[in-house]
Image (cartoon, rainbow, N blue to C red):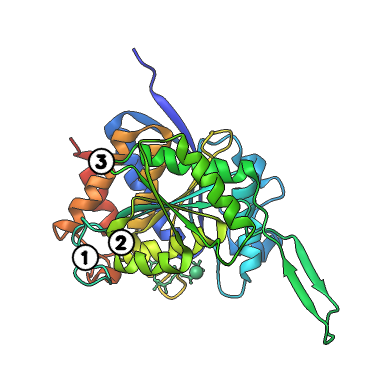
Amino acid sequence: MATRKTYRIAVIPGDGIGKETVPEGLRVLDAAARRFGFDLQLAHYDWSCETYRQTGRMMPEDGLDRLRDSDSIFLGAVGWPGVPDHISLWGLLIPIRRGFDQYVNLRPCRLMPGVRTPLAGRGPEDIDFYVVRENTEGEYSSVGGRMFEGTEREFVTQESVFTRQGVDRVLRYAFELAMTRPRRKVTSATKSNGITLTMPYWDERFAAMARNYPEVTTDQYHIDILCAHFVQHPDWFDVVVGSNLFGDILSDLGPAVAGSIGIAPSANINPERRFPSMFEPVHGSAPDIAGKGICNPIGQIWSGAMMLEHLGEKAAADAILGAIEALLAQGGPRTRDMGGQAATVDVGKALAEAVARAG
Ligand code: ATP
Ligand code: MG
């Protein structure tokens, strides 16, 4: 008899609505584990801006070591008014992403049936692509500095760092992802007419990687026109890959064209699985609606589906996605951001029940 698999999940609800969406995510994950026959061993960490106020740190000094043995990290949201972004980001999110070499930031941008997109006349068949963002180097380096501060001659520089290893590994991920999709297409975001050293290098590595994947169609656009195409021709895209900065821009624009911020999921992935990957909704802690029980938990729940897929539980992941799709298409409970009246827990319970019944 095959042994039942157990996955160790580090759970960090974080701040604001993260404390409300994560329990619903866990509710649905628990239903999936029962239905599909695996176990989730949860370790809860209450690291947040509240922790920062009490201890002066977002997470303990040995925080990364505590997470290291988990199979995945399930995160809500971090950030709260009064705690500057550089503290919440650099005290928790960035150390985890960098410490665990989560060099791929992955965001599915998929218009679900029954969800309204801001793009007039577009339906679910037009918007179904992934944004793959390089998550560790590129434009977000700290190389540079300020000189002649406070004088007329003052100047500031900040350099981009593109390594062959860093560029190739994210490109390879994008091509491998495209190989799993029917359209098998990769689009590269670039700007080699203005940024004349690093971007042509990216283009060069992109062309070299494409030669390893003759079955994959490729194209490339400068980031400015690519943003316009996201809005005007979302149906052109399948897998879109970009550097840290360009990927960052596209990975907010993509979910925006796919409808509500409340349903968009994301993953920070270490594809080699040397370290745990981290799954979190695209939205933040939403202080304006936190504590009221009205936020949309679907982004969190969908992130949970991405986590199960990463862990190898594809059938369970598909069941969660199918449940989300059916709930949205068939007028199941909806939170206010989607025009409904339902509470956060109503949506979580409806999805957990659907997953428990999944065929
Ligand atoms: P961050 O900087 O952490 O990304 P933010 O302030 O930029 O946070 P969010 O926290 O995502 O952005 O919130 C933006 C707005 O979107 C919020 O004011 C909130 O009203 C709405 N919102 C975000 N997430 C949800 C959700 N899950 N359900 C309902 N509304 C949401
Ligand atoms: Mg924000």
Label 1 close to label 2 by CB (< 8 Å): yes
Residue plotted at (55% across, 66% down) = 79
C-alpha span from label 3 to label 2 = 26 Å
Q: Earlier in the sequence, mark 3 or mark 2?
A: 2
Reading the image, the residue beneath label 1 is 122
Reading the image, the residue beneath label 2 is 234
Q: Residue furthest bottom?
A: 152
Residue kind at label 2, given as amino acid type: Pro
Reading the image, the residue beneath label 3 is 319
Under circle 1, the secondary element is loop
- Image quadrant of ligand 1 equals bottom left
CB at disc 1 and ligand 1 closer than 8 Å: no
Residue kind at label 1, given as amino acid type: Arg
Q: Position of residue 182 (x, y in %)?
A: 27, 41
Is residue 285 shown left or right of residue 85? Answer: left
Look at the image and tell me whether residue 264 can be seen. Answer: yes
